[in-house]
Image (tube, helix red, strand yellow):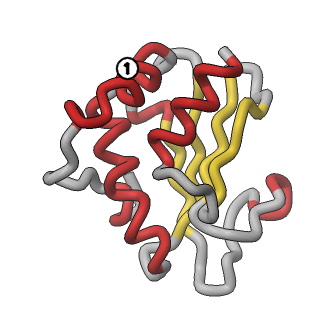
Amino acid sequence: MSLETMQPNPTWDAASYEDAVNTLEAHNDEVVYTVWAGDWCKDCRKLLPDFGAALEAAAVPDDRINEIALDQDKQGPMVEEYGIEYIPTIVVENDDGEELTRFVESEDLPPAIWLAAELDERL
């Protein structure tokens, strides 16, 4: 993993988020998570360690997680192709490259919970 902010939070309690972890685990071999973030970003440092812990608890394979580090101008790989404006942004795609859902920093729930709910609806 290339982003320090994606290192799992050691105090995150998977048992408290069992439904979200179960959903992520149920789909861990059929979706890919691409995370645009910056270790310098306050919102990324706040949200992503718990998301990293959720992915770890769900046993999501490393090859299904793409981490893209952006500079302080929010520039980096695939920013324009995916229309990335705010970070963190997490795009979830199926194996055909079809975007299933996207978490953007301003959602009202933490990334793992929000994405799990979206995946429950769409898959």
Circle 1 residues within 10 Å: few <14, some 14–19, many ≥20: some
* Residue furthest left as drawn: 11
x and y percentages locating residue 98 in the rendered image: 79, 28
Disc 1 element: helix
* Residue furthest bottom as drawn: 72
x and y percentages locating residue 4 in the rendered image: 34, 65
In which quadrant of the rendered view does residue 20 lie? top left
Q: State the residue in front, 70 or 23.
A: 23
Please say whether residue 82 is visible from this viewpoint: yes
Q: Residue at x 62, y 56 (%)?
A: 107
| Figure check: 67 above or below 122 | below
Please say whether residue 59 is visible from this viewpoint: no
| Figure check: 116 above or below 51 | above
| Figure check: 74 above or below 61 | below
x and y percentages locating residue 91 in the rendered image: 66, 44
In which quadrant of the rendered view does residue 115 lie? top right
Q: Residue at x 63, y 64 (%)?
A: 106
Q: How many marks?
A: 1
Amino acid type of disc 1?
Answer: Asn
Q: Residue at x 63, y 31 (%)?
A: 118
* Residue labelled with disc 1: 22
| Quadrant placement of the C terminus | top right
x and y percentages locating residue 34 in the rendered image: 59, 45
Judge from the rendering whether residue 15 lies leftward or rightward of residue 18; answer left or right.
left
In which quadrant of the rendered view does residue 108 lie? bottom right
| Figure check: 28 above or below 112 | above
